[in-house]
Amino acid sequence: MEFAAEDKSLSMQGMKAHSGQDNSAAAAAPAANVATNEGLLATDATPQQFCSELSKLFRVRSSEVALFRLDGGMLKFLFPEELKTAGTIPLSSSSAIAAHTAISKKLELFNNFPRVKHASIFETVKLKQQSEQPDPLTIQKLISGPVLDAQGKVLGVLQVCRKGFDLLSAGPDFSLGDLQQLERATKALAKAPFMKTS
């Protein structure tokens, strides 16, 4: 699978990603655990259970994981719960990163997300884990990956982000290791019954 992202290039065994930082490469810290994500997906797992476990793996809040299923040319939220009724994203959207990920079928990494032109309407929805915050946290760093079936057809998109008041408060940059971990998670998701359209 190919990698695409912002400003500055990193190279690892012929794969490229970008950190979004002008003067430094992405942090080398890998995802919390390199265990296979197959174990995350029990046969009766729900999108909520999968995303909750994935958030632990990446050491982010569960509200920092988003899962979309493609249905009729629209990306529909499966997680977080609060966004299921907030709307859908058409694949034709030129400003939605999730739509771009689905169309390009590439993993994407953004370690300076505020600089990226993107649709921010869903960031205004109050999520349970943010309800104690006086000001809503915004996405500062994001990785995004397509969920593809065995034939390469897009089933959905999985995203993990780090929110904060600014880049520093959001935590460490995502790394190439994080992208690889995300790719393994998307492969596990491709087998999940809830990713199939009804």
Image (cartoon, rainbow, N blue to C red):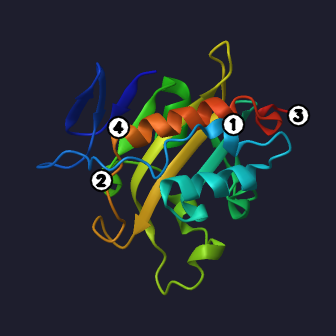
Can residue 91 be seen in this snapshot?
no
User: Spatial distance from mark 4 to mark 2, Cα to Cα?
Assistant: 15 Å
At a point 29% along the width and 21% down the height, the residue shown is 13
Which quadrant holds the C terminus?
top right
What amino acid does circle 3 point to?
A: Ser
What amino acid does circle 2 point to?
A: Asn
Q: Is residue 162 left or right of residue 194?
A: left
Question: Which residue is disc 1 drawn over?
Answer: 74
Q: Earlier in the sequence, mark 3 or mark 4?
A: 4
Question: Which residue is disc 4 drawn over?
Answer: 176
At a point 11% along the width and 49% down the height, the residue shown is 23
Dots 1 and 2: beta carbons under 8 Å? no
Q: Earlier in the sequence, mark 1 or mark 2?
A: 1
Which label belongs to residue 112? 2
Q: In front here: 88 or 129?
A: 129
Question: Which residue is disc 3 drawn over?
Answer: 198
Q: In front here: 12 or 116?
A: 12
Q: Earlier in the sequence, mark 1 or mark 3?
A: 1
Q: In front here: 150 or 83?
A: 150
**In the displayed structure, would residue 137 be above or below residue 194?**
below
What amino acid does circle 4 point to?
A: Leu
